[in-house]
Amino acid sequence: MELKFHPYNLELKNTFTISHGSRDVQPTLIVSLSDRGFTGYGEATATSYYGVTIEKMQADILNIEDLIAENILLEPEELWELTYPHLKENPFALCALDMAMHDLHGKRNRQPLYQLWGLDLENIPLTNYTIGIDSVEKMVQKIKEFPWPLYKIKLGTEDDVAIVSELRKHTNSVFRVDANATWTVDQAIENAKALKELNVEFLEQPLKANDWEGMEKLYKESVLPLIADESCIEESDVEKCAGYFHGINIKLTKCGGLTPGKRMILKGRSLGLKVMVGCMTESTVGISAIAQLLPLLDYVDMDGGLLIKNDIADGVKVYDEKVHFPERNGTGVELYEK
């Protein structure tokens, strides 16, 4: 077995602003696992908000290199169980490793990963395209530059409804609104009424992650469906969200990869929750892993490859309002030559 790290700086097409801050560059780490002539790739982005660095991810994975090598022939889920105790404090590193193992597993078995899981691509959701917080003029410009049937609008300002009202003048596309945990209960109730009239499909994480009392009230009174994001980080959170949210948004980097992500999807479904998987502005490496889950999802946010200027890999691509899968095994990823 050979373990390698490939750090990159992904350059964003536009400054990306949410309520937590702004960025023009997204550092990311690609992990590759090679064995018996096959190579699998996984990815996790670094983010200061969660205290995740490229160096820490590399160091934590290197600490268990021998454990990985000794068990490289196991099923990905089995390797995840072995590595989880060592990487549970760094789920981003665990995610990159788990993605790489799943890609390797599919390539060794000469099948796309979704086929190994017994899934087909007949009915899969289309990703939204994210419009970050900016001046209204620039948000309108981004919509005009990238016509798309489905936008996620990042909010968390003093003029959120006014912003959406202005954007609505320039497109008939469906909107989703992500308030990034910035609203009060009363704001969310009132905003939902106005936003429903503006063809908003749902509200994502309107309140702070731990405001369960507020969510209980909002769940009863909101005229729009509510999707948990920061309130649904790991597997144990899924059950907590039932009765407080109508759905969950799973981030593979936050929960630790495809292995727990798939379990969270199935758990959410069993509780009657709508299920979404979101991205953290990953390259096509991470997006291709997310794409394997599409047949299991109601909604998806996998626009990372659309938001960056210097994509680093071939694999599952989104264009012409469709998701295009390559005729390759595993997650379908091949890194471009540097």
Image (spheres, rainbow, N blue to C red):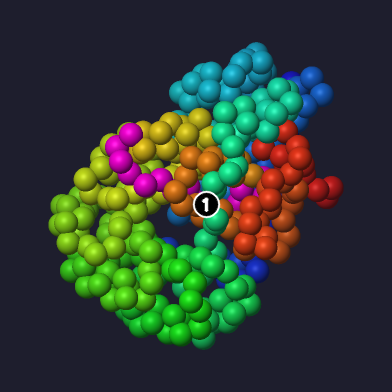
Q: As displayed, is residue 45 above or below residue 142?
A: above
Q: As displayed, is residue 238 above or below residue 279?
A: above
The amino acid at mark 1 is Pro
| 7 or 265: nearer the viewer | 265
Q: Is residue 284 left or right of residue 249?
A: right
What residue is at 77 percent from the left and 44 percent from the top?
335
Q: As displayed, is residue 6 above or below residue 86?
A: below
| 47 or 142: nearer the viewer | 142
- Within 10 Å of disc 1 (Cα), the crowding (few <14, some 14-19, many 20+) is some
Q: Dividing the picture into quarters, in which one does residue 122 lie?
A: top right
Could you tell me which secondary element the residue under label 1 belongs to? loop
Is residue 338 among the parts visible in the rendering?
yes
Residue extending furthest toward the right: 337
| 62 or 159: nearer the viewer | 159
- Tell me the magenta residue range: 270-287
- Dot 1 corresponds to which residue? 125
